[in-house]
């Protein structure tokens, strides 16, 4: 089970965007990275070819999980994610307030 899900509110804990908050847009479980809209942008210079316009495009680069902390939807604090087994299901819990993060 992954620590993060699409739609989670997170805080960046390292790098140039440290302290910024964002919502997870995409997850790449194999790489253990996730995409945050508008963060970790890098500029790519594209040469104009034929009909296509050249210019500088800003493309978001995925963040490694290690630079991200979850903001608990219950206590609104930055927290680490724990796992708890309830019956046959694993649920994510907040290590700060011990509440389940995902409510159905
Ligand atoms: Zn909490």
Image (cartoon, helix red, strand yellow):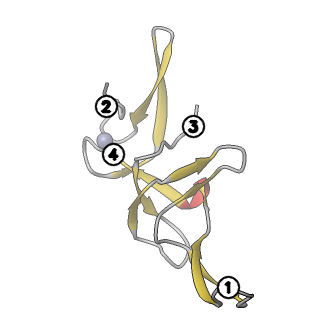
First in sequence, mark 1 or 3: give its number: 3
Label 4: how many residues lie within 10 Å, few (<14), some (14-19) or many (20+)?
Answer: many
| Ligand 1's quadrant | top left
Marks 1 and 3, how far apart at CA: 43 Å
Q: Can you give x and y, in whole percent of width and height, for residue 57 in the image?
A: 59, 83
Q: Residue 78's spot in the image, x, y percent?
A: 37, 54
Q: Which residue is mark 4?
A: 72
Query: Which residue, as the protein is rendered here, is positioned at the far front?
Result: 51
The residue at label 3 has a CB less than 8 Å from ligand 1: no
Q: Residues within 10 Å of mark 1 (few under 14, many from 20)?
A: few
Earlier sequence position, callout 1 versus callout 2:
1
Q: Residue at x 46, y 53 (%)?
A: 24
Q: Cβ–Cβ below 8 Å for labels 3 and 2?
A: no
First-in-chain label (3 vs 2): 3
Residue 7: horizontal and vertical position, in percent?
40, 47
- Label 2 belongs to which residue? 99
Residue 2 shows which numbered tag?
Answer: 3
- Left-right relation of 23 to 77: right
Mark 1 and mark 2: Cα distance apart in space: 55 Å
Spatial CA span between label 3 and label 2? 17 Å
Q: Which residue is mark 1?
A: 51
The residue positioned 42% from the left and 50% from the top of the image is 70
Label 3 sits on a secondary structure element that is loop
Say which residue appears at 56% left-offset and 61% top-offset.
67
Q: CA distance from mark 4 to mark 2?
A: 9 Å
Image position, residue 74 (x, y; %): 25, 41
Q: CA distance from mark 3 to mark 4?
A: 15 Å
């Amino acid at each position: 089970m992954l620590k993060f899900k699409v739609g989670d509110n997170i805080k960046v804990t390292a790098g140039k965007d440290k302290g910024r908050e964002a919502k997870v847009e995409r997850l790449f479980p194999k790489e253990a990275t996730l995409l945050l809209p508008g963060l970790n942008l890098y500029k790519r210079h594209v040469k104009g070819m034929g009909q296509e316009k050249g210019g500088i495009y800003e493309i978001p680069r995925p963040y490694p999980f290690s630079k991200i902390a979850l903001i608990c939807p219950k206590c609104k604090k930055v927290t680490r994610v724990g796992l708890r087994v309830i019956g046959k299901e694993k649920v994510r819990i907040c290590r700060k307030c011990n509440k389940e993060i995902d409510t159905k």
